Image (spheres, rainbow, N blue to C red):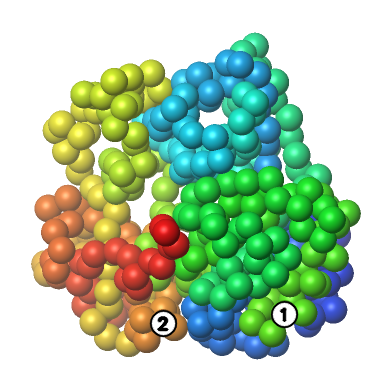
Amino acid sequence: MTTETLLHTPLHALHLELGARMVPFAGYEMPVQYPLGVMKEHLHTRAAAGLFDVSHMGQIVLRGAGAAKALESLVPVDIIDLPVGTQRYAMFTDENGGILDDLMVANLGDDTLFLVVNAACKQQDLMHLQQHIANQCQIESCFDRALLALQGPKAVDVLARLAPEVAKMIFMQFAAVRLLGVDCYVSRSGYTGEDGFEISVPAAQAETLARSLLAESEVAAIGLGARDSLRLEAGLCLYGHDMSQDTTPVEASLLWAISRSRRSDGARPGGFPGAERIFAQQRDGVQRKRVGLLPQERVPVREGAELVDADGAVIGTVCSGGFGPSLGAPLAMGYVQSSHAAIDSEVWALVRGKRVAMKVSRTPFVAQRYYRG
């Protein structure tokens, strides 16, 4: 896309005012960093609170008595028994078990579900829902809403000044909250590994809310660059990089995201696209798996770098990589042959023709600090 055809979020003018460096991302012109710089933005979020504009994400509402059952036919997680006021991580899968997108699903009560899907996939996700479950529930796109993420250990102090009730929320709870006189949806969740909140707000009121939050001493504006390094340290996948339609939840090391009730020995086994292949992979294993990787030299290893064994045979590829400011070292994730996926296995990345020693590592690389009460 050219600059002229890129979409803008409701906070676009504010980003320019704050001196953001803007880049194309998922069809939008988005802030990759502010004058503070990626490193300091990252560390500020870990120490205090960072405000992210994630309004490019897609927001969708499902309504009707059959909404939960309908959505459950498309995802390998428990939606029917999802408690009101709670949200859950989910994935759309295809008939081969490939991941079409990952998303968050919240139960608002009154037979209403609230979905947040990835920006690059939101139109295809909307079509996917309309194609498969439009006859079972009402589907409403809410792409006119903005989405803000307030992340970091001071996020709760800041947001509680506007709505004291948010301090009682725990990780993955979801509530309708009034902020500055505006009806919003707030979840205690995020994409940084830190405690924090995501706030869905009508587009017309987004800038007023963002300015109010940024006026607090603990809060700084944070761009996509630090968002990526934060999520990578937390071991969180980015759709289109660490998982795709060409990977299954088993290969992507996301079995934890398949609810126990939907597994082969669960109360409601299967019933979602690709279940048979996914269950077979659980039983028989897979040829490749996503793993954490720690370079043994201070050399960042980027997405796309080939991974080889001691003999130089290609055994995988890096899917995400960079430098971890909190870790103080480079880090990466990649897909390797299962025979090389054990923790502490040695592999090598090819970086500009040079072999860089890597060690398979557990994730997250930096401990997650979600508030669980």
Q: CA distance from mark 1 to mark 2?
A: 24 Å
Please say if 31 is above or below 238: below
Residue type beneath disc 2:
Ser
Q: Residue furthest top?
A: 135
Q: Earlier in the sequence, mark 1 or mark 2?
A: 1
Residue 292 disc label: none
- The residue at the point 65 percent across, 26 percent down is 110
**Quadrant location of residue 360?**
bottom left
On the rendered image, what quadrant is the C terminus found in? Answer: bottom left
Residue 40 versus residue 157: which sits nearer the camera?
Answer: 157
- Residue position marked by numbered label 1 in the rendering: 216
* Residue 326 marker: 2
- Residue at left 41%, top 58%? 372
For this view, does 170 lie left or right of residue 146?
Answer: left
Front-most of residues 335 and 169 = 169
- Can residue 277 be seen? no
Left or right: 50 with respect to 204? Answer: left
Q: Residue at x 77, y 58 (%)?
A: 179
In this rendering, the answer to whether 93 lies above or below 20 is above
Within the image, what quadrant is residue 95 found in? Answer: top left
For the point 44% across and 27% down, the residue is 81
Camera-near label (1 vs 2) is 1
Place of residue 93 in the rendered image (x, y in percent of width and height, measured from the top left): 44, 31
Q: Quadrant of the N terminus?
A: bottom right
Q: Give SS at disc 1.
A: loop
> Badges 1 and 2: C-beta atoms under 8 Å apart?
no
Indicate the secondary structure of the residue bearing disc 2.
loop
Residue situated in front as seen by the camera: 202 or 111: 111
Residue 212: horizontal and vertical position, in percent? 79, 72
